[in-house]
Amino acid sequence: MPTIADLPEPPGLPVVGHGPALARGGTMHRTLFRWRDRLGPTYRVRLGPITAVVSSAPEIVGAVLRERPQTFRRASYLSDVIDEIGGHGLFNAEGDDWRRLRRSAVPGLSVTSLRNAFGTMVRSTGRLRDHWAAAGPDRRVDVLDEMTRYTLEVIGSLTLGYDFDAVRRPHADGVHQRLPLIASTLVRRMYSPVPYWRWFRLPADRRTDAVVAEASALVADRYADAHRRMSAGEQPTCYLDTLVKHSLDHDEPLTAKDAAGSIVSMLVAGEDNTAAQVTWAMHHLANHPEAQAKVRAETAEVLGDRQLPDDAASLSRLGYVEAVVKETARVNPPSPYLIMEAVTGTTIPDGGDGLRVDPGTVLILLTDDGADPGPFRPEQWLSDPPAAPASHPFGGGPRLCPGRNLALIESMLLIAMTCHNFTIEPDTSGGPVGERVTLAVFPTNVGVRLRPIRG
Ligand code: HEM
C-alpha cells in the first residue's frame, strides 16, 4: 500500500526543503496549486524536519475533514501557536474539549440566534453608511481596513455584548485598534522557521502580550457580569453568556481565563475571513458596474426608501446579493487550504489502493481546485441547482465553519447597503490589487471611491 515515501515531490533545497519556496511572495496557495498541476492531486513537501502530504483529491480531502476529531486534528504546531498567544478556543480545541466547546458555540451562531442579533448588525451597517456619507465622494476608501473594523465591531457585540464602536472611530484609541495585532503575530509565528518567541520576545511580541492582557481584562469584566446574570436565570444574549450558561447547566468548570481564550479565538476566527470576503466582493462590484446595477435594481425593489435591509425578511428577498457573495467565495475563497494532522495511524481512501499515514503526519488539504475561476458571474448561482461548480469555502465535516451564516448575513448587509446608497468606483492610486496569505487570503490594495446616490 502506498505511503508518503511513494509520493512525488517538487524540487526543493536540502535541510530546509520547500519552506522558502512556499514563503516566497506571500502566496503559498498559488505555489501549492502549481505543484499540484505538475505532480498530480497528491504529493509531498518537506518543511524543515517535517514531511507533509499535500492533497486536492476529493476522496482524501473529504475523508480527513470527516474523520475529526478522532482520526485527524488541526496541525498541532498551529494549535500550539494559537494556545501560546492566549487564544485557546473552538478553532484549536481537540477531542472532548472540542466537543464541549462546539456544543456550546453552535446554538449561539444558529440562524435563529442570529435573527435575534440582526439589530446589532444593522446598527453597525448603518454607522458605516453614515461614516461614508460624511466622508464624501473624494476620499479613497481603504476597503480592507474599513471591513476589518466593521467585522470586529459585529463579532465584539455577538461574542461579548460589547460595543467596540470601531466603525465610526477609525483613529480613536481603543482595544479595537490593537486587536488586529493578535492575528498578525499569529501569522508571523505560524510561518516562522523557528519558534523564537519561546526563548525571547521581540517588541511586536511584547505588544501582542499587552493586547491579549487588555482583551482578557475586558472579558474578565464581562465574565463576572455574565456569571451574575446567567446564575439569576436570564437568557443568553451573546457567546460569552452561552459559555457561562453551558458551564452552569452542566456543572462544568469555566474560568475567566478559559472564557478569554474562547472569545479571543472567536474574534480572530470571525473577523479576518469575513473582512477578506467582503473586500473581494467590493473589488468585483467596483469592476463590474453591470453586477452593481443588478444589485441596485434588486435593493430598489426590496428596500424602497429605506437605507439598508433593516429586517431579516428583506434580506431573504435579496437573491442576487446572495449570489454575489457566493460568487465571490468561488472566485476568491479566503481559506483555500487547511492544515491537519493524523492522530492515529490510518489508511486514507483515495479512490485507489489508499494512502497509509503514520500518527503525526501533517496534511495540507487544498479545498479549492485552484483552476482559473473564469469571469465573475453571480448569475450562475441563481438557477436551481446552481450552474456554478461546487465549492467548499467553509471546510467540511463535523468542524465545518460555524460562522458561515453570520458571514453571509454580514456580507449581504454590506453589499446591499453600499450599492443602494453609493456607486462604487475602483481607485487604484494605492497600486494594483493583489493577494497575500495571512490567516486568510487577503486582497491587497483594494481602494474604492463611493459616490452617494441617495440623501
Ligand atoms: C467568509 C467568512 C468565513 C470563512 C471563509 C470561514 C472559513 C472557515 C474555515 C475554512 C474553517 C475550517 C473548517 C474546517 O476545519 O473544516 C472555519 C472554522 C471556523 N470558523 Fe469560520 N469562516 C468564516 C467566518 C467565520 C465567522 C464570522 C466566525 C465567527 C463566528 C467563524 C468562526 C469559526 C470557528 C470558531 C471555526 C472553528 C470550528 C471548529 O473547529 O469546530 N468563521 N472557518
Image: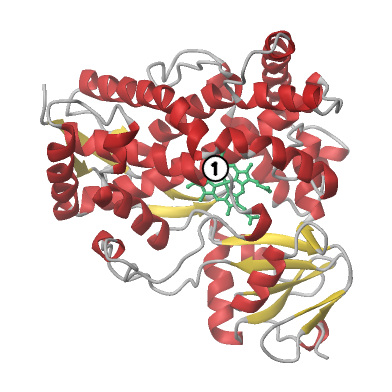
Report how many numbered discs are placed on residues in the image. 1
Between 81 and 317, the one lying in front of the other is: 317
Q: Position of residue 430 (x, y in %)?
A: 32, 42
Between 80 and 12, the one lying in front of the other is: 80
On the question of residue 37 being in view, the answer is yes
Q: Quadrant of the N terminus?
A: bottom right
Specify the color scheme.
secondary structure
For disc 1, does the CB lie below 8 Å from ligand 1?
yes
Q: Position of residue 139 (x, y in %)?
A: 23, 28
Q: Position of residue 375 (x, y in %)?
A: 27, 67
Residue depicted at x 50% and y 46%:
404
Mark 1: amino acid: Gly
Q: Mark 1 highlights which residue?
A: 403
Q: In the figure, is residue 143 to the left or right of 99?
A: left
Residue depicted at x 31% and y 42%:
316
Q: In the figure, is residue 448 to the left or right of 30?
A: left
Disc 1 element = loop
Residue depicted at x 69% and y 28%:
208
* Quarter holding residue 415: top left
Using a 10 Å C-alpha cutoff, classify the residue at mark 1 as few (fewer than 14 neighbours), some (14 to 19) or many (20 or more): some
Q: In the figure, is residue 421 to the left or right of 126?
A: left
Q: In the figure, is residue 47 to the left or right of 62?
A: right
Q: Is residue 46 above or below residue 153?
A: below
Q: Quadrant of the C terminus?
A: top left
Q: Position of residue 272 (x, y in %)?
A: 52, 41
